[in-house]
Structure formats: C-alpha cells, structure tokens
Image (cartoon, rainbow, N blue to C red):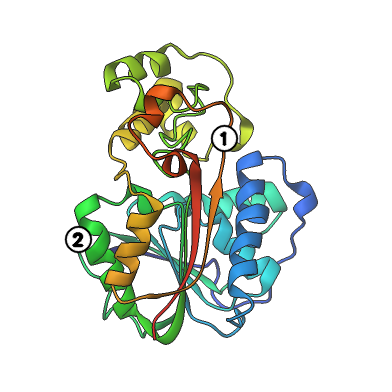
Amino acid sequence: MKFQNFFKSFFGRSPAASWSAEKITDAWFQSHFEYAADVVHAWLSPVVDMRGARMLQFGCGDGITDLALALRYGAGHIHGVDIRREYEKLPKIAQQQIGLSRLPEALSFATITPGTPLQGRAQPYDVLMSWSTFEHVQRDQVLPILQDLYACLRPGGYFFLQIEPLYYSAFGSHLGRYDPAPWHHLQVDDDALWQVIEQCNGPMHADEVDFGFEDFGPDGYKRFVFEEYRALNRLTADELVQLTTQAGFSVVRQERRHYEPAPIPEVLLEKYERDILLNNEIILLLQKK
C-alpha cells in the first residue's frame, strides 16, 4: 500500500492544547470521540500501556477516535492510514467540536493505496487497531492485508479488530439511515433496494451523518453509500476469525454481539442460520506470538 500523503500533527512539537468535550454538538463526532474510544481503551488497556506504545490505526477515517485516544487516554503515538483523506478535516472538526487549536503531536496520518504492503515502512508497531473497516476490504484482499498487518506487528503485540454491522445482520447493508426495514437487503435485489434509497427524503439519525456528507450533497451521498453497500465483502464472524488465525494471529479474546429489532422473516431462516442473522458485531483482541 503505497504512501501517497503523510499528514503530520499541527505545528510540530508543542505543549498540549486545551479542549472541552462540553462543546460537542455533532452526534457522529461524539459517538467516535467517546463511545468508540472507550471501547478500544477498555479492550487494550489491560494488556497495553498506550502512553508508550507505537500504535497503527488501519482505516482511520476522519481520525476522531485516534484523537480521543490521544487526548482522553494519553496515547503517545498513533499513526492512522486510510485509502481516503477524511483525516485532513480533523483539525477543523476538532476546533469546532472541542475547541482544540492544534492536534496532538502523538498523531500522524497517511493515505495508502490498496495492494501495496505496509510492511517495512516503519519499525514494527506494538498495537494495531481497526474499527468498522474490514467489512469494506475486497474479499480476496482480506487475508493478504491481515498477513501484511501481522508482519507490521512486533512479537507479543496486540491487534484490536472490530466490525459493526456484519453483513447478514438486520442493518448489515449500512443503509439503515435510508431504509428502516431490517434484513431488507437480504430480501430484495439491488434495483429494488436502490429505489428505496433514492426515494427517501426523511431526516437521517444524527449519528449516521459523517463529515463526508457535505462533500457529496444529499443525492451524491446516497449513491456513495449505496456503492459502498454493493462492495461489502459479506464476511461472517466465523470467516473473520478463521482468516485472522490463518494470517498467524492468536485470538486472546472475542465478543459477538447480537441484535434482533424485529422477528426474523421465515424466508430468511430457511436460507441462513439464525445466529448469522442476529450477529451484528464482532470484537476481537488478537496477538502475535
């Protein structure tokens, strides 16, 4: 994965800037600055001292969770990589949402190109992280990427990996902001699904509106998220665990969360296992022995 752009923290090495979570008004920012960061910290803190660990966030997105880990939990070194450049908005977002004048020196970001390995770009990391990213990786690239990440981790290091929602769960299409019918994506073809999305004009839940929305506009964003849905790799929790162990990782801990917002349609129970339809999230703590 070729490095195309390296985005360092603002103004180099300088004292930490003041900030306040009481200023937060955006639900998307809040959920990633608080909930996501809390989950990552809860899973990693028993085994890792974030203050001294070198951490890599694979699929950093807008970098909000990385910012929270640095500001709220004292993470001393987080390098985020992504195929998009949403992290470039982070300085402005952080200033607007928490009054932060400059990003912590602990943070750095880079744009990567799918297919080019990360191995050898830096010294081995102590910790790897990935939040709701691997469902978007092309299926035939999941194992090679996991193997590359394994090579980027020092022996004894840990990998926090989370996916939510899993494809076969009620809202595994990632289109719930437009289509409130659970498991609808498993019951209709893409043309019928797109018609529902295209005709939706109601307001979206605030925590479903990310900071990329303004880049596309309402109609462009619909098309963007629909194409993202079509590209989902449809991994199940079992398949993900199998691929991580095949890449060399040992599973230290795992949690599978289930969600049943309505009775499962009988037609789906005839086709899929109940657990696959209910399992909407998996969280893994992996280790390189």
Q: Which quadrant holds residue 255?
A: bottom right
Amino acid type at circle 2 is: Gly
Q: Residues within 10 Å of mark 2 (few under 14, many from 20)?
A: few
**SS for dot 1:** loop
Residue displayed at 63% across by 68% down: 41
Q: Earlier in the sequence, mark 1 or mark 2?
A: 2
Q: Which mark is residue 115?
A: 2
Which residue has dot 1 on it? Answer: 260
User: Can residue 103 be spotted in the picture?
Assistant: no
User: Can residue 4 be spotted in the picture?
Assistant: yes
Which x, y percent locates residue 242?
32, 63
**SS for dot 2:** loop
Q: Which mark is residue 124?
A: none
Residue at the extreme right of the image, as rendered: 22
Whole-angstrom CA distance, mark 1 to mark 2, is 37 Å
Considering the image in quadrants, where does the C terminus appear? bottom left
Amino acid type at circle 1 is: Glu
Viewer-closest of 90 and 160:
160
Residue displayed at 32% across by 15% down: 192
Q: Is residue 108 left or right of residue 147?
A: right
